[in-house]
């Protein structure tokens, strides 16, 4: 696929407030994107997506008929919409509401108010997701990189897998917790492990420590994908032997950079 530019992105904005919609559209124009499609509620947006085929959905958290969480979950449950990039723009700060958006694989979560530069970076993240620069990994033969993805959220596993697929990694096994990951590592050989931090049964830190200390694949590169911000916990994860820590949202450009670094060091 040929690379898109910001000017070529077709954006659908889902925002009930005409004032907020006008402000966001002005910021989009300042960032280089023009003529977005505007919907005032989730139902009309979902109905229009298959026909309009936007490159990016930008939504508020609270809509007249549903929340942004409901909207992105409906998209992920609809085959023709499941890979459509989603961005949230909201003044909501409660992690109880934001974490499900991250788990669903949002391109970005922008607070209100936001700067044009923040929006532009999110638009570039969308471009990276749609048309990633796979040339960066050509010498690593990404199609041959057997990858194990570990996350208790099916939506998160699917999003991580989509990002990896987009950059050329084809062989992906998904499991939902650390115990299942250990079983998979005992049954097969993998070149890369991508894991969440917060999981039932066995969390990401325990999994990393087990792999490094007790696994026959103790040197496997491990990327941890997490929205965790507690530095003491992240420090413990680093000490356990993780190769790299990647924030949620799981951005294509960050993943490419991390893979270049850690796979070349193997």
Image (spheres, rainbow, N blue to C red):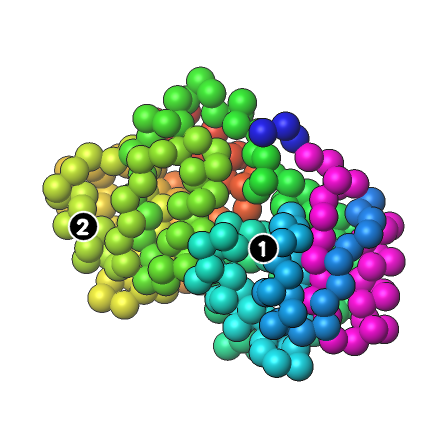
Specify the farthest residue to the bottom. Answer: 64
**Label 1's element?**
helix
Q: Is residue 149 magenta?
A: no
Question: Which image quarter holds the N terminus?
Answer: top right
**Cα gap from disc 1 to disc 2, whole angstroms:** 40 Å
Rendered location of residue 88, percent (x, y): 64, 64
Residue drawn at the location 85% of the way across and 73% of the way down: 19
- For disc 2, the neighbor class at 10 Å (few under 14, some 14 to 19, many from 20) is some
Residue where numbered disc 2 is placed: 182
Q: Quadrant of residue 204?
A: bottom left
Give the image location of residue 64, x and y in percent.
Answer: 66, 81
Q: Which image quadrant is residue 165 in? A: top left
60 vs 138: above or below:
below
The spot of residue 192 in percent (x, y) is 32, 37
Q: Write down the region rendered in magenta.
A: 4-30
Residue at image point 80% right, 67% down: 21
Residue located at (48% from left, 66% from top): 73
Q: Determine if residue 29 is in view.
A: yes
Q: Residue at x 18, y 43 (%)?
A: 185
Q: Are marks 1 and 2 in contact (CB under 8 Å)?
A: no
Per the image, the residue denoted by label 1 is 50
């Amino acid at each position: 696929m040929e690379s898109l530019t910001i000017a070529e992105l077709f954006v659908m904005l889902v925002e009930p407030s005409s004032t907020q919609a006008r402000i966001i559209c002005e910021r989009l124009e300042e960032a280089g994107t023009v003529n977005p499609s505007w919907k005032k509620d989730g139902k009309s947006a979902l109905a229009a997506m298959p026909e309009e085929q936007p490159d990016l959905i930008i939504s508020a958290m609270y809509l007249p008929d549903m929340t942004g969480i409901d909207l992105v979950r409906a998209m992920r449950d609809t085959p023709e919409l499941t890979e459509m990039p989603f961005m949230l723009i909201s003044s909501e700060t409660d992690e109880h509401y934001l974490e499900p958006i991250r788990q669903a694989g949002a391109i970005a979560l922008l607070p209100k108010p936001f700067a044009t530069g923040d929006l532009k970076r999110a638009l570039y993240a969308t471009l990276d997701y749609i048309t990633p620069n796979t040339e960066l990994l050509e010498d690593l033969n990404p199609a041959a990189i057997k990858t194990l993805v570990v996350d208790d959220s099916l939506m998160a596993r699917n999003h991580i897998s989509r990002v990896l697929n987009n950059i050329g990694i084809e062989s992906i096994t998904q499991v939902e917790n650390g115990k299942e990951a250990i079983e998979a590592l005992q049954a097969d050989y993998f070149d890369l492990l991508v894991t969440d931090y917060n999981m039932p049964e066995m969390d990401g830190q325990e999994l990393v420590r087990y792999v490094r200390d007790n696994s026959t694949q103790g040197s496997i590169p491990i990327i941890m994908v997490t929205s965790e911000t507690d530095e003491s916990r992240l420090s413990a994860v680093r000490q356990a032997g993780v190769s790299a820590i990647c924030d949620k949202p799981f951005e294509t450009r960050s993943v490419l950079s991390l893979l270049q670094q850690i796979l070349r060091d193997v």
